[in-house]
Image (cartoon, helix red, strand yellow):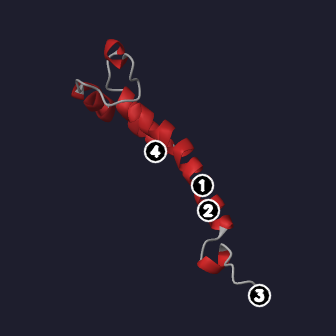
Amino acid sequence: MSEQATFSDRGFDLATLYKALFLAVVVVFVATPLLAPCSADSNRSASCGPYPFGLPQVWEWENYGGILMSKRYWQLLGNS
């Protein structure tokens, strides 16, 4: 055998790298739609501005309270 070590001899497997990259892409595609409403729903239209996916500068807690107190929210949550 050659004295030159391959990637698999060093414990580095290219298939593992591809799996990790694939999972990272899946996490981004799944997490973005889930996190976007959490950060954007509490924004007023004018405060969304150039950062629609950022955290709001002024939190509108009444919006969250109104949603949590509504019967429709809990019905839809139960149906999902």
What residue would you read off at disc 2? 17
Up/down of 58 relative to 23, above or below: above
Residue 32 % position (x, y): 49, 39
What residue would you read off at disc 3? 1
Q: Mark 4 to mark 3: distance in Å?
A: 63 Å
Residue 16 % position (x, y): 63, 66
Q: Which mark is residue 78?
A: 4
Which numbered disc, 2 or 4, marks the residue that appears first in the sequence?
2
**Mark closer to the observer (2, 4):** 2
Residue visible at 65% across and 70% down? Answer: 13
Q: Mark 2 to mark 4: distance in Å?
A: 39 Å
Mark 1 is surrounded, within 10 Å at the Cα level, by few (under 14), some (14 to 19) or many (20 or more) other residues, namely few
Secondary structure at numbered mark 2 = helix
Mark 2 is surrounded, within 10 Å at the Cα level, by few (under 14), some (14 to 19) or many (20 or more) other residues, namely few
Which quarter of the rendering shows the N terminus? bottom right
Amino acid under label 3? Answer: Met
Left or right, residue 66 beside residue 33: left
Which numbered disc, 2 or 3, marks the residue that appears first in the sequence?
3
Mark 4 is surrounded, within 10 Å at the Cα level, by few (under 14), some (14 to 19) or many (20 or more) other residues, namely few
Which numbered disc, 4 or 1, marks the residue that appears first in the sequence?
1
What residue would you read off at disc 1? 21
Which numbered disc, 4 or 3, marks the residue that appears first in the sequence?
3
Amino acid under label 4? Answer: Gly
Amino acid under label 2? Answer: Leu
Contact, mark 2 vs mark 1 (Cβ under 8 Å) = yes
Q: Quick one: 21 or 56, which is closer to the camera?
A: 21
Amino acid under label 1? Answer: Leu
Q: Mark 2 to mark 1: distance in Å?
A: 6 Å
**Mark closer to the observer (3, 1):** 3
